[in-house]
Image (cartoon, rainbow, N blue to C red):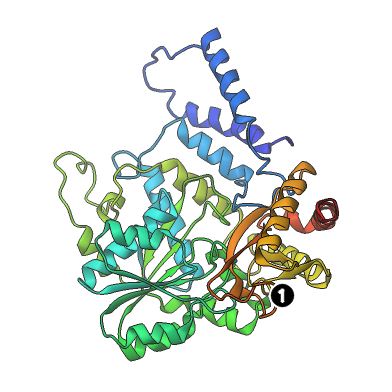
Amino acid sequence: MPHDPALELLSDCLPALQRKFDDLPNFPLAKIDSGMKAVLEQACERMADNYPYFHPLYAGQMLKPPHPVARAAYAMAMWLNPNNHALDGGRASSQMEIEAVREIAAMFHWDSHLGHLTSSGTIANLEALWIAGQLNPGKRILASAQAHYTHSRISSVLKLNFASIPEDSRGRMDLDSLETELRKGDVGTVVVTVGTTATGSVDPLDEVLELRDKYGFRVHVDAAYGGYFRLTTASMAPETRRAFEATREADSLVIDPHKHGLQPYGCGCVLFRDPSVGRFYKHDSPYTYFTSEELHLGEISLECSRAGAAAVALWTTQRLLPLVPDGKFAADLQKSRDAAKVFYSFVEKDARFLPAFPPELDIVICSVKSVSPAESSRLASAIFHRAALLDLHLALAQLPVSFFPAGTWPEGGDVRDGKVTCLRSVLMKPEHLDWIETILQKFDQAAQESS
């Protein structure tokens, strides 16, 4: 594992923080003893049983190492362990959260908003659908079949009627199928995914908004994975660019700083374009709010205790890497997309593979050419396991055969509701671009040795 500069940063800033409290009476703290060292060594040994998520040769699941400054800021804040439920428990970190969330809202060109951090994208989506249910009681929630499964699960928890809309051949919500459901007149909210977790597909948000004008429903954008690519729209295909630019018109939006935002888990974020939805959060507490009459984050969130350290890490990272299209943060995102384009070009030209469709973001999906989906799935699994032995870690995804042209599998491959196991590469680290030739060499070797 490479040296992490976060340790050096922490060794400088933590003593400075401790000195701020030197005027308090001293009291004894726990001392390091052999028992502490022993159990920490055991924990270290257990943690070694992991994939190398931090390394560019890991291109499997959506795991991106936090920025060193985020690691250092989070650990520094943990010395105080602030709680951002109320100003009493997180005075400085609560203000830092408000400022950091405001910067995220500005990235989507929102002039006004109500929003806060959450412990995950799931909780952020739960809050958005909870508000949707409050505003349109009894109305249905619709989302694409390729939307994250959390939406159907959350709808069940909230007792909301949920329905899935078929996807098109590029993994995006099918608009004809959507309008068929809208004509029934009982739809309250449509969830639009800007960057699906399986393929990185971007639903046509701009066209969904046109349907909103016609049928009248709320639009919730799940940009948990793809949201930060709002900073790189200049290089996108026109239809993808239009979808990202239309995010300014959504009613609510979720984004996960712990994915592309360089943050430790867990750090999600939910935004509402209409601040008046805060009325649904109103509650009283007999003990929490007594030091300030200002807005407490706990008054606009369903979660109570939340890690203030997450806000400190996010605020610090965004000070170093502002969320602007011409900054280093955006340039690194572009590297991830460029790496995906190179990977796609390789599999597109290679007679052994068939990519599903060009990547809109930084995820590449391809099947292995064979006589049937079953044999293609077997070969994909073999390449996946062989690549891991070469220290290249990919992922597998079960996808509809309809993502591929008719006739792709001569023996029984045209069943439109069938599935095929595909190889999936998530090239979300900027270093993937520098390592792409090595990645492709290992990928090629794994394919040769698995045939």
Q: Residue at x 19, y 57 (%)?
A: 282
* Residue bearing the label numbered 1: 410
Q: What residue is shown at x 63% (from left), y 36% (from top)? A: 50
Amino acid type of the residue tagged 1 in the rendering: Pro
Side of 196 where 305 appears, left or right: left
Any part of residue 96 in sight: yes
Image quadrant in which you'd find residue 325:
bottom right
Report the quarter where the N terminus lies: top right
User: Residue 318 or 447: which is nearer the viewer?
Assistant: 447
Q: Is residue 153 above or below residue 139?
A: above
Q: Position of 88 compared to 326: left or right? A: left
Instruction: Name the residue rendered at 24%, 46% in the picture.
Output: 292
Q: Is residue 340 left or right of residue 202?
A: right
In the image, 247 versus 344, the foreground residue is: 344
Q: Quadrant of residue 426?
A: bottom right
Q: Assign the C terminus to one quadrant of the image.
A: bottom right
Where 101 falls versus 10 (above or below)? below
Q: Is residue 33 in view from this perspective? A: no
Estimate the x, y position of residue 345 in percent, counting from the top left: 79, 70
Of all residues, the one furthest to the bottom in this rendering is 214
Q: Position of residue 336 (x, y in %)?
A: 69, 62
Label 1 element class: loop
Q: Nearer the viewer, residue 430 or 52?
A: 52
Point out residue 288 in the picture as x, y percentages from the top left corner. Answer: 21, 41
Query: In the orientation shown, which residue stands out farthest toward the top?
Result: 34
